[in-house]
Amino acid sequence: MELTFNAFYTLIAAVIVLLLGRFLVNKIDFLRRYNIPEPVAGGLVAAILSLLVHYLWGFSITTSSELQTSFMLIFFASIGLSANFAKLKEGGIGLVIFLVCVASFIVVQNAVGMGLATLLGIDPLIGLIAGSITLTGGHGTAGAWGGILEAEHGIKGALALGMASATFGLIIGGIIGGPLARLLINRYKLASETTKSQAAERDEHHVANQDSEEFVAFENPHQVRLITADNAITTLGLFAACLAFAEFMTVFSKGTWFELPTFVWTLGGGVILRNVLEGVFKVNIFDRAIDVFGNASLSLYLAMALLSLKLWQLADLAGPLVVILGAQTLTMGLYAAFVTFRVMGKNYDAAVLSAGHCGFGMGATPTAVANMQAITNMYGPSHKAFLIVPLCGAFFVDLINATVIQVILKFFV
């Protein structure tokens, strides 16, 4: 029996999941020590309970996908609205190096997937599905390419396999990033842990200054932000403008060479709006309000994404696909530890960047940000990581991934 939650019930359930995750992380030392994000902790418990209810009583729950998508788009809009060009320059050569590192991994990810598929005697395109299409690309890319692979390349069940692989990646991306960064930080003595009392004192007494150069979006989600009703209303208007722009461009670009996913247009709209208003019209943008709405949307989106998981669908994965996804998890961890971490400087920022890479390399950009927040909540800020990862993971990665996939389909299939 299918129970459908409308937007109100979905929101209530997501808030309960977040509160549960916060309670678990605060009470279970293992979760805090290994930097498991609160939405992931609560969401996995909810998904497991949903699995038990499905097997014992035959009930399953469908949540509001429209509300989940809306929070995702608001999150990406907040990334764009936070990306003023002056701050992006701070990323400097580090942003370029990280992009090269990420682009190289996309190639490695597809090589592992297609290579193992060939060795296991199945179509290499199934390996591509269990590669960057679903792991770096996420559910949106899986849905887009699944239909193409089914219609044009004869891969039966490509959409279902893609969704299952993307679900696996979303879970694993939120699990391996924190422990990997913790391992690197402790092994190379890059930072010291803060106690729960120290973290609470920092969050309570350190108020972000809108004009401070130290302010970086998403970096301290529990920190106090001083905003007013006027700031909130203006910021909501900016978000609405980004979403309206994205909706228009998604329809306008459909079927053209510059067709892009809606969330990319949302982010791009935020970047354009922010810099035009600041650079041309000299309008002050309220970073603190953007940060509050962005962090809230991030947490709610992740909670809804994990709340909507149907773990029993993962049981439908064929044996070879399980092998490929297991190998991809191992590859991601090794690449982040031995390539991303070392190439980015083998320091604390590099460890946080590695956690972020695990997030969007296996799951999605919101997972990457949540991974980094879990690390910086315990060890301290990493301005460089929060300047680089959100824009790279949300914008550049999708462009690179789409190019790599198209090249593979054109020349190697």
Image (tube, rainbow, N blue to C red):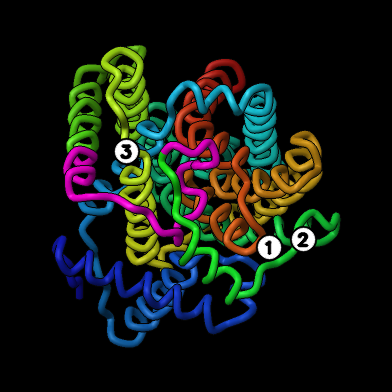
Q: Quadrant of residue 132?
A: top right
| Depth order, front residue of 4/13 | 13
Tell me if mark 2 has few (under 14), some (14-19) or many (20+) residues whose alpha carbon lies within 10 angstroms of its own.
Answer: some
Look at the numbered disc 1 and give the secondary structure of its residue: helix
Q: Residue 44, percent across and down?
A: 46, 71
In percent of the image, x 23 and y 43: which residue is there?
231
Q: Amino acid at mark 2?
A: Leu
In percent of the image, x 78 and y 34: which residue is there?
343
Q: Decide if residue 183 is on the left or right side of residue 266.
A: right
Look at the numbered disc 2 and give the secondary structure of its residue: helix
Q: Quadrant of the C terminus?
A: top right
Residue assigned mark 3: 286
Tell me if residue 215 is in the magenta stretch.
yes
- Residue 315 visible (yes or no): no
In percent of the image, x 48 and y 46: which residue is there?
364
Q: Quadrant of residue 224?
A: bottom left
Q: Which residues are magenta?
A: 211-236
Q: Earlier in the sequence, mark 1 or mark 3?
A: 1
**Furthest residue toward right:** 188
Front disc: 1 or 3: 3
Q: Amino acid at mark 3?
A: Phe
Q: Earlier in the sequence, mark 2 or mark 3?
A: 2
Q: Decide if residue 52 is on the left or right side of residue 202.
A: left
Q: Residue 65, percent across and down?
A: 24, 53
Residue assigned mark 2: 183
Residue assigned mark 1: 179
Q: Decide if residue 203 is on the left or right side of residue 305.
A: right
- Residue 412 visible (yes or no): yes
